[in-house]
Image (spheres, rainbow, N blue to C red):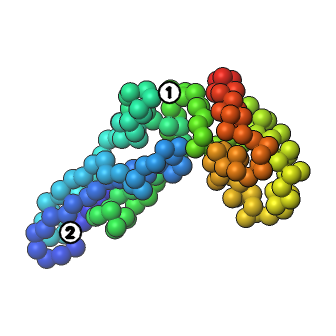
Amino acid sequence: MKVTNTGAMQGKEVVQLYVKDVLSNVVRPEKELKGFAKVDLQPGETKQVSFTLDSRAFAYYNVKLKDWHVETGEFEILVGASSQEILLVESVVVESTVSLAKSYTRNSTIGDLMGDPQAAAVIQAMLSQAGEMMPMLQDGSDMMIEMMRNMPIRAMVMFSQGAMTEQGLDELIKHLNSNK
């Protein structure tokens, strides 16, 4: 990025570089500061500012791996004078070198399961059975679909009107995780 002093006096500018994981599977900050440079500029002077990003710039600490992990996906590189004054945005796609096995819990959402072909087959059959018992699931509206997608699977016990028990949910989770 080029920085120019357009004023009549000597000045300084701070250039900040942020990285944003566009679609992370874990909760991450909106943008993470990964570098900055303070540039001295004479009146009318232009300087080129550059940054080098290594894999750590895209990583988060994965407690299961006990190590830093980079997810495959799109990242935005944001450069500006501050986190609120972003002047340059570019996208890059990063490929992870580590493949993580998915693990499901009571807090996994139906959407999480639907994103996994093996789990989707299991959950789709269950939702079809539940739809026969609960007319609201047959609605098919976008709102109902989004509500279901974001619902944790533990809610199936309550919504199933007795068809899914706590023990049944535990067995389902065990079954889904044994296929990994």
Q: Nearer the viewer, residue 127 or 78?
A: 127
Considering the numbered disc 2 on the image, is that residue within a helix, a strand or a loop? loop
Q: Amino acid at mark 2?
A: Asn
77 sits to left or right of 97: left
**Going 75% across and 57% down the picture, which residue do you hit?**
145
Q: Which residue is mark 2?
A: 5
**Going 60% across and 35% down the picture, which residue do you hit?**
104
Answer whether residue 133 is visible to the viewer in this image.
yes
Q: Residue furthest left?
A: 10
Displayed quadrant of residue 30: bottom left
| Residue 26 at x, y percent in the picture | 48, 44
Mark carried by residue 143: none
Q: Residues within 10 Å of mark 2 (few under 14, many from 20)?
A: some
- Picture layout, residue 61 above or below residue 44: above
Q: Amino acid at mark 1?
A: Thr
Considering the numbered disc 1 on the image, is that residue within a helix, a strand or a loop? loop
Displayed quadrant of residue 175: top right
Labels 1 and 2: the sequence-earlier one: 2
Point out the frontmost of discs 1 and 2.
1
| Residue 150 at x, y percent in the picture | 64, 53
Q: Nearer the viewer, residue 75 or 44?
A: 75
| Residue 15 at x, y percent in the picture | 26, 58
User: Can you say which quadrant of the picture contains the N terminus?
Assistant: bottom left
Q: Residue furthest bottom?
A: 8
**Going 35% across and 51% down the picture, which residue do you hit?**
32
Mark carried by residue 97: 1
